[in-house]
Image (cartoon, rainbow, N blue to C red):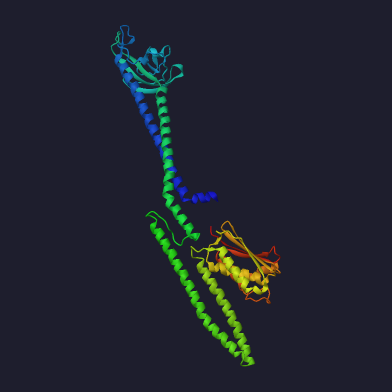
Amino acid sequence: MKLLRLRRSLRVRLLLGTLFWIAASILVAGWGLGSLFRQHVSDQFHAELTSQLDQLSAQFTLDAQGRPQLTLALGDPRLSRPYSGYYWQIDQMADSATARPAAVGQLRSRSLWDHVLALPADILNDGATHQHRAMGPQGQRLRLVERSVRLEDSPDGQARSFRLITAANEQLMLAPVARFNGLLWLALGVLGAGLMLAAVVQVRVGLAPLRALQSALAKVRQAETQQLEGEFPTEITPLISDFNKVLAHNADVVARARTHAGNLAHALKTPLSVLANAADAAREQSPASAQLAQLVSDQVAIARQQVNYHLSRAQVAASTRLPGAKTAVSPLVDGLVRAMRQIHAERQLTLNTGPFAPALGFRGEAQDLQEMLGNLIDNACKWATHRVDIQARRNADTLVITVDDDGPGLAAGQRDRVLQRGVRADEQVPGSGLGLAIVDDLSRLYGGQVTLADSPLGGLRAVLELPALV
């Protein structure tokens, strides 16, 4: 689940994509530059060997006895230092048609000391140049260049073919390539680290407006404000403007819904009152009229209850979609307790509250919380013998309010039934059977719930869970 959230994260996607391309670019650049430098060094290496071979060819001649000699020693001092890594050698070939030399190492550089270069069999045309690899003195791996030279002016008048060879230790070419590659990858690594750090900073800076937008949305959700507020880049300003228009339109819809609900309640109140008054007047005319009047009075009372129930539900359904609503719990509970003490004054009940945290709040409309708590506290007062306790606390992002009474309680099998509309636990106690049903419906509209359980006081405990201010 955590891996799935990371895959869906815009920040992680941007970082992974950027880091992938940085790594790929560095690898391609490192391989390409390393290959170019290796090729350059190799070309320079063989160019130097070819240059030495040209010098060797220019100074090569035969003495009076027909033996190969150099008219002038080559100027590179490394050719005179034993095992220096730079060498030359002259082999006499049997003839131009065979690859076998007649005399190997007939003349060679002092740097070879007592070593003779052994070359693979190779047929060379006159003046042709070939490149080979071979083992040299002290196990050195050599790169060498060879050329066939044919001399017609030998003392005995016979043409002779010779193979001229210049060679160098391959490590003299590989060492600078290795040093360059080391420095290259170090530089690319530092560059890559800098680019990755820049990518992280760029992603954080680039997504900072989204974090600001998230913070602004959290303030709306936590009822601190009713619109998105703050400084945002011009690229997302149209989105903020459109979202604020939606919030304003939503608030306007809620206001109109409440107005229509109030108008409907007021419009129905008058005809229902007329019907009730007519029924009361007809009750005294005759026994038949009294029976009809009672039927009308009962139906009017039911109609009033149903209208109040559905209007209250419609109002809350609208208000739960309005962001920015918040209600402090402590003053609302204190007001309800004062009202209940007056309503149930003849019973001399003890109503205990809190203490409540000052910041404890409900993320919703005050009148909705008043409706739910009023029904729960009134129900507890109707059934309590002497005492009612009201407590409230916050559990994570949930507001938990408990109402306990010391009454007779309620059997577990009846607790779900009394939350249904029109069901009453006892017909002897006044009520319509809508109070707990309204609480259940309103709490569900806010994403909460109401549950009934045994109270530590011996009666019934009602637990109301609602979204809390975070």
How many numbered marks appear? 0
Answer whether residue 89 is visible to the viewer in this image. no
Residue 234 position (above or below residue 151): below
Indicate the position of residue 66 as horizontal and vertical percent values.
Answer: 32, 8
Q: Position of residue 300 (x, y in %)?
A: 58, 82
Residue at screen point 55% across, 83% down: 273
* Residue 241 in the figure: left or right of residue 302: left
Classify residue 134 by image quadrant.
top left
Residue in front for this viewpoint, 349 or 225: 349
Residue, far top = 65
Name the residue: 67% across, 70% down: 349
Q: Quadrant of residue 32?
A: top left
**Closest to the observer, 147 or 269:** 269
Left or right position of 199 against 395: left
Residue 162, compared with residue 262, is above or below; it is above
Q: Position of residue 188 (x, y in %)?
A: 41, 35
